[in-house]
Amino acid sequence: MRPLEGLIVLEFCQFLAGPSAGLKLADLGARVIKIERPIKGEACRQLSIKDLFVDDSSLLFHTINRNKESFAARFKKS
């Protein structure tokens, strides 16, 4: 059993700092649910290092968001 099993975390952040914290929580066993924009998702999906992509999202995005679930939500009406 991992130390944070049973804990649910909602992650509303983008790019690297916030998702890095969520990654550490997920690695310790928390259920981390990443909330993303509908259609485009988090901006980091298009941020790549050396133009490496997996399934239309950057390898960087996949690396920093491993062990997380993803959910698309629209919070403000345009």
Image: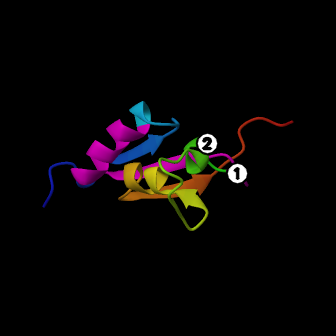
| Residue drawn at point x = 53 percent, y = 37 percent | 14
Q: Estimate the x, y position of residue 54 in percent, counting from the top left.
A: 52, 65
How far is the residue under mark 2 from the one under mark 1?
8 Å
Q: Which residue is mark 2?
A: 43
Which is more toward the observer, 2 or 45?
45
**Can residue 2 be seen in this snapshot?**
yes
* Quadrant position of residue 44: top right
Q: Estimate the x, y position of residue 62 in percent, counting from the top left.
A: 44, 57
Is 12 inside the magenta-drawn segment? no
**28 shown above or below 67:** above
Identify the element where label 2 is drawn: helix
**37 shown above or below 12:** below
Q: Estimate the x, y position of residue 67 in percent, counting from the top left.
A: 35, 59
**16 relative to 12 in the view: left or right:** left
| Residue drawn at point x = 25 percent, y = 52 percent | 27
Identify the element where label 1 is drawn: loop
**Residue lying farthest front?**
50
**Can residue 7 be seen in this snapshot?**
no
| Kind of residue at badge 1 | Lys
Query: Disc 2, disc 1: CB below 8 Å?
Result: yes
| Kind of residue at badge 2 | Ala
Is 21 inside the magenta-drawn segment? yes
Q: Which residue is mark 1?
A: 40
Magenta segment: 19-40
Q: Estimate the x, y position of residue 28 in percent, counting from the top left.
A: 21, 50
